[in-house]
Amino acid sequence: MLALSLVTASCASRKKTVAPTPPQTFEWLTANMDIQAEGNGMSFNDLSGQVRMRHDSIIWLSVTATMGVEVLRAKVSNDSVWVINRLEKTYLAEPLDSLALQLGVPLSLPWVQTLLLDNNQGVPPVENQTVQLKTFLMGGFAAKLKYSNIKLDQPTTFPLKITDKMERIRLKKQP
């Protein structure tokens, strides 16, 4: 009997079944980015940036060039878009639905978050994850974003200051 119980016990599987963990979502996200971008006949390989995001609420982006000079700042909320182009000294401040109509695309905050996170589940990027952005808005644009220094669920601020030295631009619907 003892030998039979030892043989049957030794044949039993000792592996435990582990249920998969659901993907981690976030309320707040702050991350740095290394950016490679091209569009409108130009290519940029030395850009960096920071993204701050409150899930389904607001996105703030800042893009800097060599030596830390900010070239672009954008803020997207559920109802509005603000973009500052410091290179051309222009800015855009439009209601989101108006901008979507002008561009002829279904532009929304969840769509922009899905684009930046490369998923529509609200799962944050992982350290050194690269996200490919491809869009044909405004003449074609493609970019690679490599995320680093990711911080989750730490509330942050969303600065956006437009100076009087900038000229407002208006976009026209593409044919």
Image (spheres, grey):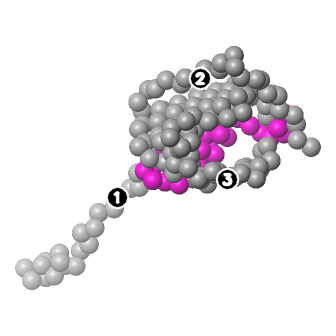
**Can residue 21 be found in the magenta stretch?**
no
The numbered disc on residue 160 is 2
In the drawing, does residue 67 fall left or right of residue 45? left
Q: Earlier in the sequence, mark 3 or mark 2?
A: 3
Q: Earlier in the sequence, mark 2 or mark 1?
A: 1
* Residue occupying image coordinates x 26% and y 72%: 13
Residue 174 location, x and y as percent? 88, 41
In the picture, the quarter occupied by the N terminus is bottom left
Q: Earlier in the sequence, mark 3 or mark 1?
A: 1
Q: Give the labeled residue for mark 3.
A: 43
* Residue occupying image coordinates x 41% and y 43%: 149
In the drawing, does residue 7 fall left or right of residue 138? left
Q: Give the labeled residue for mark 1.
A: 18
Q: Nearer the viewer, mark 3 or mark 1?
A: 3
47, 140: nearer the viewer: 47
**Can residue 124 be found in the magenta stretch?**
yes
On screen, residue 44 above or below 163: below
The answer to whether the residue labelled 3 contacts the one labelled 2, judged by CB atoms less than 8 Å apart, is no
